[in-house]
Image (spheres, rainbow, N blue to C red):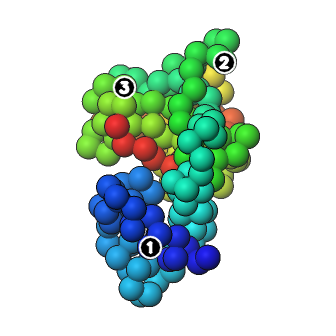
Amino acid sequence: MTPTDKIRAILELDGWKQERLAQELGVAQSSINRWLHGKSEPRGQFRDAINAMYIRVFSPDDEPEKTVKLAGYVGAAQAVYQFDDGAAGYVEAPPGANDMTEAVEVRGDSMLPLYETGTLLYYSKQLPPDAMVGRRAVVRVADGRVLVKTLRRGSAPGLFTLASLNAPDIEDVVVEWAAPIDWIKPR
């Protein structure tokens, strides 16, 4: 079955409309419409998400729900408050999640208008910060804080400026790793 066939099969079920499927997959409804009418094909993470959604929708009810570790909360200062014991909670896994996938939950209004309280941000790869320059990412800085920021080059090699949505930039910090945001689940 092609991804488009899987989309059609899901949409034939009671309670499923293009709008709901788009929200579940984290895409615009216009993308669903383009895929259904052959104007484009889902690729990469969207193809994987459709496959995972199809399996989830058509799998037996007794199959356990897959979960991933909730690594912490993005709070008022846009820092992720990590759980010390690593067992504070788990959340529903996104389509295509692997053993490395983790999530952070947005708390408060510091990331408006992009992310509301309760939004889950999933990530699974910790990359060198140079690989994420110009992109929004979950980052770990040398002092141990984990933040959601857009990386920019700093004033010297090995230093980075972390651009915020609603706060002053944090300039010239050492970043240990940066993780692309793989999936966003609105509240």
Distance from label 1 to label 3 (Cα)? Answer: 36 Å
Vertical placement of 161 versus 132: above or below? Answer: above
Residue 110 horizontal/vertical position (percent): 31, 31
Q: Residue at x 50, y 77 (%)?
A: 4
Is 32 left, or right, of 46 in this rendering?
left
Q: Residue at x 64, y 47 (%)?
A: 97
User: Which element type, helix, strand or loop, lies under badge 2?
Assistant: loop
Is 83 left, or right, of 148 in this rendering?
right
Q: Nearer the viewer, residue 158 or 80?
A: 80
Residue matched to label 1: 8
Q: Residue at x 53, y 36 (%)?
A: 92
Residue matched to label 3: 107
Residue type for callout 2 = Gly
Mark 3 touches mark 2? (CB < 8 Å):
no
Which marked residue is nearer to the observer: mark 2 or mark 1?
Answer: 1
Q: Nearer the viewer, residue 46 or 171?
A: 46
Residue matched to label 2: 86
